[in-house]
Amino acid sequence: MKSSWKVSWLLVCLFLTGCQMSVLNPAGRVAEEQSRLIIFSFAVMMIILLVVFVLFFRFLWRYREDSRIERPPHTQENDNKKLEITWTVLPLLVLLLLAVPMLMQTYSLETKTTQEEMTIEVTGQQYWWRFDYPDENIRTAQELHLPANTNITFELNTEDVIHSFWIPQLGGKKDAIPGRTNELHLETGRPGVYEGKCAELCGAAHTDMRFQVVVHEEDDFTEWVEAAGQDVTPEENETVQEEGARVFQENCLACHAADGAATKNDQGPNLALYGERDKISGSFANDEEQLKAFLRHPNDFKPSTDMPAYNNLSREEMDALVNYLHGLTRENVQGGSD
Ligand code: CUA
């Protein structure tokens, strides 16, 4: 490889490290421990690097061509116990230094903490995530809502291929493997919105198999749970436009539920409180223009998605539908149910 190519690749790698998902900005206990581990191993590596470089330049200088030091005779040294023991024992110590805290951390992730507070069933499929709250009896997709400062057990499943569930700022990640349930124990910390992602190459739209994680204050979370489970069967809800509700019923309801009651249709992602979501399908800004473009040509956004194109809707129908979807907010849902 030419050296200019090498430099270009190095630059590309540097730019890639600038992606927004940071494991070094933890927002929960597990992630904090993991980021401490990263910083610790990085420090160990830097110390080794420093020693190696100092020696390298020292030898480079000391044994340079015009040095006046008398060079050692060109003899092969066959036996030097002291040296051999040193370069065997030193790396062993370094490996132990790295291995012990890492193994401890890995095993601590496997064990449930004593005060387990919440279980969420996560199901990955090409290319979206379903989230079931068995205790609350609700379901949502692409936007995971969690209470702050809580221990959470994620039960990871998949409907098709292997996916990997990862929320960098909360810690992780772990694979969802066909035919078995993997458990991941994390702890939320401060409230905020975090990025989640599938971390296992799973097909054409793997890159866009993202989700949002909204960590709420406790009261706010309870409010969200109540609102998400509200029945917003379109005909019963007067606060969202009738025409939009009709278009939704005729075109979308067969696959998507508009509320999070866990018994609803869910071939496609659940759309509970869709109007409050920041992202379409967990990946693209949820504004009017983009949502219309997504509904007309979902395949342009997510290659090989199961979502059919709705290019057959008239402009008025599309306007009404987008209005309806963006009207699915806590305010409307609760208002509509009294
Ligand atoms: Cu699912 Cu990558």
Image (tube, grey):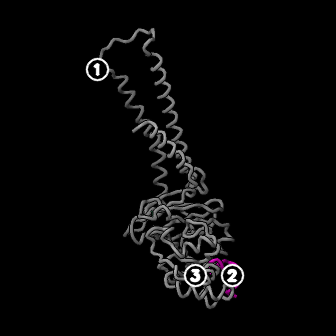
Provide the secondary structure element on which disc 2 rests: helix
Q: Nearer the viewer, residue 23 or 41?
A: 23
Q: Residue at x 62, y 76 (%)?
A: 273
What's under tag 2, amino acid-wise? Asn
Q: Is 247 placed above or below 276 here? A: below
Q: Is 100 placed above or below 87 here? A: below
Q: Are marks 1 and 3 in contact (CB under 8 Å)?
A: no
Q: Nearer the viewer, residue 181 or 240?
A: 240
Q: Classify 10 Å Cα crowding around label 3: few (below 14), some (14-19), many (20 and above).
A: many
Lower position in the chain sequence, tag 2 or tag 1: 1
Q: Is residue 316 visible?
A: yes
In front: mark 2 or mark 1?
2
Mark 1 and mark 3: Cα distance apart in space: 77 Å
Q: Is residue 331 magenta?
A: yes
Q: Nearer the viewer, residue 248 or 160?
A: 248
In the picture, which quadrant includes the C terminus? bottom right
Disc assigned to residue 78: 1
